[in-house]
Structure formats: structure tokens, C-alpha cells
Image (tube, grey):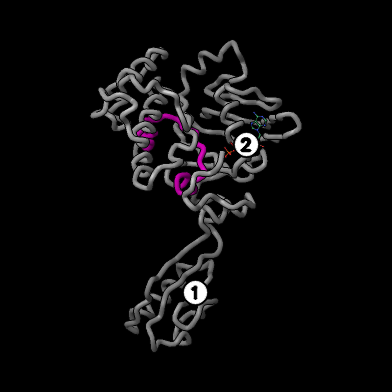
Amino acid sequence: MAAVRVEQLVKRYGNVDALRGVGFEVDEGEVFALLGPNGAGKTTTVEILEGFRSRDGGRVEVLGYDPGEPATSRRLRERIGVVLQELAVEPLLTVRQVLSRNAGYYPRPRPVDEVLSLVGLGDKADERVKTLSGGQQRRLDLGLGIVGNPDLLFLDEPTTGFDPSARREAWGVIRALTGGGTTVILTTHYMDEAEALADRLAVVAAGRVVAEGTPESLGGRDVGEARISFRLPAGVAVSSLPVAPTGGSEGAVEIRTDKEVEVLAALTTWALGEKVDLGGLRVERMTLEDVYLRLTGHRAHGDGAPPAR
Ligand code: ATP
């Protein structure tokens, strides 16, 4: 059953067409990522779903409610959790106090001790918020997002600005949450994050969904040509290979093929028989980033720097 349904969603800001007919569905229990370059329309889409922005056209259903309907907005808010990039939290309260206070806003909150343990802040429960490190504050942000025991959780660029190990830790926390059945809508600029967390994703560009699918299949990257590459030891001629290379040089061989299983079988059987080492053997397909760049025609933020907002 769908937790979220979006059809032909339109939003204009003055003469800017921010959304021009966005559509997608998110199933219950699914982790769904929205990817796209700056200004593509991700935040606008998510804030319409959260009920924080109005729309100019289209149909939206979130947990069975229309988020643009004032009469039911409170009931919807009680069932969603939102984790923004920067949350204003009183620095002098302790972690437990902040979580307990927010728990009080919801009819069926998650026990605070359970939240502390899920986000890995059990040993910081009685510390003041201002003493937390940046990464620990983001864990608290996540905790605040889930303390209301939401059926649907929105995560806005949950690891922007994290160092690599903090990102891995945060992914672990998010997986633990989603393992419990919570539906998640995530916006991110990081391909590896979408790949690590999302069951399905949509690429948004210039106010439209330009592709949708699993991270493995997006843009058809699970089918089509693969690139096999390896190095031959000195003295072994390329002409002695059982399969003709399609590129590379004498030492570094490259073979592009859509029959990689057959080609690999021929190569490895030959190498074992001839006792030749295929140094650095790799089989690659288009990366998610390749597909993303092709779809959006933009440069991705692959340098690890947080994108400008
Ligand atoms: P980012 O990755 O930079 O966060 P985004 O995909 O979330 O971008 P949006 O913030 O939804 O993009 O913006 C979509 C378009 O709408 C952009 O052209 C933006 O300039 C415009 N826009 C967004 N909010 C407003 C606003 N309040 N008033 C006017 N224009 C806006």
C-alpha cells in the first residue's frame, strides 16, 4: 500500500516554475530518496508533502491525508517526523530533557530511552546539548525526528558535512530505524548515500522527475555494456589473449562487452591455464553518478564538499 502518492504536482513562485508535474509513489516501509541538483525542486516537493507549503496544482496524499487540507493537518503532523539540516534546540537543556519535551507533543511517543539507544546517545542522556559534538547533535536531530514514533520520516540531507566515518555511523542509525518499518523520504546530494540507504529513488531536475527506480537499475545501468580491465605482466602479448581488447595499451587491457560472464570465463580459464596474472582485474558498469550526470546534465557534488543552499 502506498504511504505517499504524488501526481502532477505543480508549484510556482512568481514567474519561477519550481515544480512542473512531479509524480511518484512511496510504499509503506520503503526508503525513498529524492536526488537532484540545486534548485531542482526537492525541498519544495518535500515541504508540500509535510504540509509546510501550499501547491498550485496536482494531487498529493500522505498517509491517506491531503497535506494541504487544514482540517486534518494536525492529525497528519502527529504521524510524520521531520529531520531538518539545522534544528534549533535549547543549548542549556540536557539531551533527555529535549527529547522528553518533544515526546510530550505526540499522542503515541516512542519511549525516550528507546530513542536514546536507537540514535546511540545513551551515554550522553544527561549532558547539556551545547556540549555535544556536531555529529552527536545530528544524532539528536534524528532522535527528535523519531521521538513521536512517526509512520513517515522525512530526512533532509542527513549527512551533509559529516566526515566519512560519521556518515557510516549515521547510515547505521538510519538503517536501524527503517528496519523497524518506518517509511522514509530522504533528500540527498550524495550518490553513495542513496545507494546505501534507498530502496528506490527519483531523480528530480528542473521541476520534473526525470528517472525513477532502484539504485541498481536506474537509467538502465544494470543492463548494457560492462567494462573489464586488467594489467598483463611484462612479456605477455595482448595478441595471446583469447578475447580481443577494445581499448587500453599493451600493459593495461580494456574490454567493453555486454557478455561479461562469457568474456570473464574465457579470460580466467586462459589465465589459469597459462599461469598469467590478470593484475587489478575489474568489472565495472556505469556508476549511479554517471547516470545522474547524464540525466541532469549537471556536475554532481562528488568532491565531498557540501553543496551551496
Ligand atoms: P537544493 O538542492 O539547493 O536544496 P532543491 O532541489 O531543494 O535545491 P528548491 O529549494 O525546491 O530546490 O527550489 C526549486 C526552485 O524554486 C528554485 O529555482 C528556487 O530558486 C525556487 N524557490 C524555492 N523556494 C522559493 C521561494 N520561497 N520563493 C521563490 N522561489 C523559490
Q: Mark 2 or 1, which is nearer the eye? A: 2
Q: Which mark is residue 254?
A: 1
Circle 2 crowding by C-alpha within 10 Å: few under 14, some 14–19, many from 20: many
In this view, the residue in front, 125 or 133, is 133
Residue at image position (41%, 14%) is 106
Where is residue 9? Give x, y as percent.
Answer: 67, 30
Vertical relation: 127 (above or below) 194: above
Would you identify the image quadrant in which residue 279 lies? bottom left
Which numbered disc, 2 or 1, marks the residue that appears first in the sequence?
A: 2
**Is 125 on the left-hand or right-hand side of 160?**
left
**Spatial CA span between label 2 and label 1:** 40 Å
Mark 2 and ligand 1: say if the CB distance to the nearest ligand atom is below 8 Å. Answer: yes
Q: Secondary structure at mark 2?
A: loop
Q: What residue did someone put label 2 on?
A: 41
Q: Which residues are magenta?
A: 174-195
Identity of the residue furthest to the right in this view: 15
Q: Amino acid at mark 2?
A: Gly
